[in-house]
Image (cartoon, rainbow, N blue to C red):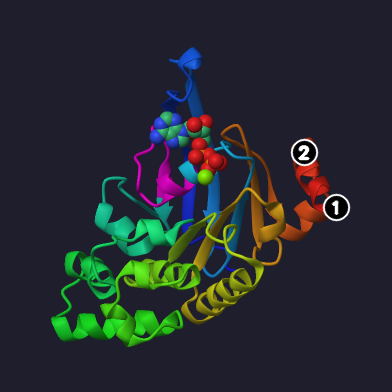
Amino acid sequence: MESIPLFSVREIKKIYKDKSNWFKKGRVVEIGPVSFDLHRGETLAIVGEAGSGKSTVGRLLAGAELPDGGKLYLGDDEINWNDSKFFCQNIRMIFQDSQKSLNPTVRIGDQLEQPLLFNTRLNKEQRLERINNALRKVGLLPEHAGYYPHMFSGGQAQRIGIARALILDPQVVIIDEALAPLDPSLRAQVINLLLELQETLQLTYVLISHQISLVRYLSDRIMIMDQGKIIEAGTIDDVFETPKHPKTQKLLKSLDM
Ligand SMILES: Nc1ncnc2c1ncn2[C@@H]1O[C@H](COP(=O)(O)OP(=O)(O)O)[C@@H](O)[C@H]1O
Ligand SMILES: [Mg+2]
């Protein structure tokens, strides 16, 4: 693994006013401060119970939400949180429900073309070539560009989600609980596809999951989150073999059942 990180996240945090429960109105939820590095070509897992702050960290890293503090560096360069073009091109997310995250009334080809129109100077022919390539990369066909989202199965929709994430050749892909809802054989297919793409494109993955069992064979390093904080971090083997925090031990114990 490279010793110089690709991205460095330093002390990012987000403060929410909790509106979920009338009785707790005004209660404040604080996620972070959280710091970590991302190396090219590696997979970092973020694991923790529901509500521990995993998706918030993912959204901050993807520039989908502005932090209430903290910095992001690409090498030595500090990234401006408002530079939406930078995030669009470099850090993409794949969501749990790809079917829902697609616009039902717009053909797949047009949905894949949108980021190319906004972020590149490619001409029509070049854009179509990119779209064909993206579809091929995820095991679909150029014909599928003419389809609407409802014409795809769940597994195919997940592949479209991956194609859309990859269309601008990002460096980092955040996979937020996108594997859990798939049945085991489909999940294995999508995992193989992600591993293949990682190898050929040198992608860095941030794999978010509340199921520790899902991340072991995919990840190089792992961060455990609890109530907005990182309670344990290390290589996947170290954390699985000698978990230090009681909550990590509990998460791992639940695997034996
Ligand atoms: N937009 C929001 N407004 C208010 N509270 C939020 C918002 N997003 C997340 N939260 C709160 O932040 C905490 C962490 O949420 P989240 O990052 O979604 O956790 P996870 O992905 O680990 O389940 C939860 O308590 C959640 O209610
Ligand atoms: Mg989440």
User: For numbered disc 1, what is the local secondary structure?
Assistant: helix
Horizontal and vertical percent for residue 144? 33, 81
Left or right: where does residue 190 sit relative to residue 14?
A: right
Three-letter amino acid code at disc 1? Asp
Examine the image and state in which quarter residue 74 appears. Answer: bottom left
Looking at the image, is 27 positioned above or below residue 52?
above
Q: Which mark is residue 203?
A: none
In this view of the protein, which residue sits in the foreground, 116 or 100?
100
Across and down, in percent, residue 148 comes to 29, 71
Mark 1 to mark 2 CA distance (whole Å): 18 Å
Q: Residue 92: tell me if it is visible.
A: no
The magenta region covers: 57-72
- Compare marks 1 and 2 and give the one earlier in the sequence: 2
Image point 62% across, 65% down: which residue? 183
Residue at position x 33%, y 72% from top? 167
Q: How crowded is mark 2: few (under 14 residues within 10 Å), some or many (20 or more)?
A: some
Decide if ligand 1 comes within 8 Å of the CB at mark 1. no
In the picture, measured across the screen, residue 118 lies left or right of residue 149, that is left
* Mark 1 nearby-residue class (10 Å; few <14, some 14–19, many ≥20): few
Magenta-drawn stretch contains 58:
yes
The answer to whether marks 1 and 2 mark residues whose Cβ atoms lie closer than 8 Å is no
Quadrant of the frame with the N terminus: bottom right
Q: What kind of element bears circle 2?
A: loop
Q: In which quarter of the image is residue 195?
A: bottom right
Residue 256 bears which disc, if any? Answer: 1
Q: Mark 2 points at which residue?
A: 245
Foreground residue, 8 or 255?
255
Q: What's the residue type where badge 2 is placed?
A: His
